Image: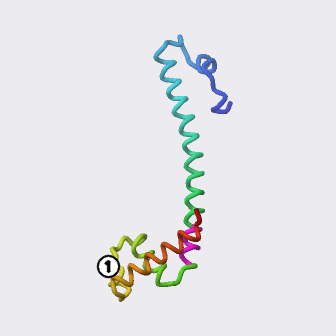
Amino acid sequence: MALGELTRAHLVEITPGPPDRWRMHNLLRLYARRLSDAYTEADRLERARDLVKDRIELIAALQSLPSRQSEVIGLHYFGGYTIAETAEILAIKEETARKHLNRGLEELRQRQGP
């Protein structure tokens, strides 16, 4: 019997002894939790697939940018570095790093569309 086919009548059948109110209440809570876990697992898998798809698209978009722009975006957003630290790592001025970041983000926004 599938989990979705389990009904209150089935719970009464499989429960030994008189179906008192608290036992029924606990069994229904257990059934609801298992059902919600099943949906949660399916939702988690769907979200994971969406995340993987989004990351692949993001990586492709970053690779299509000029190398300096993708480096600045990668260091700043994925590496967690500040603009000053990013500029120091790349041996460029801080203002130049800001320009590359802004231009790269603008290019990504334009490619994404409305």
Residue at image point 55% right, 16% down: 16
Residue at image point 49% right, 12% down: 20
Q: Element type at marker 1?
A: helix
Relative to 69, residue 9 above or below: above
Residue neighbourhood size for the residue with mark 1, other residues' Cα within 10 Å, grouped as few (<14), some (14–19), many (≥20): some
Residue in front for this viewpoint, 16 or 105: 105
Residue in front for this viewpoint, 65 or 28: 65
| Magenta span contains residue 61 | yes
Quarter of the image where one finds residue 78 = bottom left
Q: According to the image, what is the colour scheme of the structure? A: rainbow
Residue at image point 44% right, 75% down: 102
- Image location (x, y in percent) of residue 62: 53, 75
Looking at the rendered image, the quarter that the N terminus falls into is top right
- Image location (x, y in percent) of residue 40: 54, 43
Report the magenta stretch's main SS.
Answer: helix
- Image location (x, y in percent) of residue 79: 40, 72
Total marks placed:
1
Using residue 35 as the reference point, say whether residue 82 is left or right of it. left
Residue at image point 57% right, 34% down: 35
Residue in front for this viewpoint, 18 or 81: 81
Identity of the amino acid at label 1? Glu
Looking at the rendered image, the quarter that the C terminus falls into is bottom right
- Image location (x, y in percent) of residue 71: 45, 80
Q: What span is colored magenta in the figure? A: 56-63
Relative to 4, residue 63 above or below: below
Using residue 88 as the reference point, say whether residue 23 is left or right of it. right
Q: Which residue is mark 1?
A: 85
Quarter of the image where one finds residue 5 = top right
Relative to 12, residue 82 above or below: below
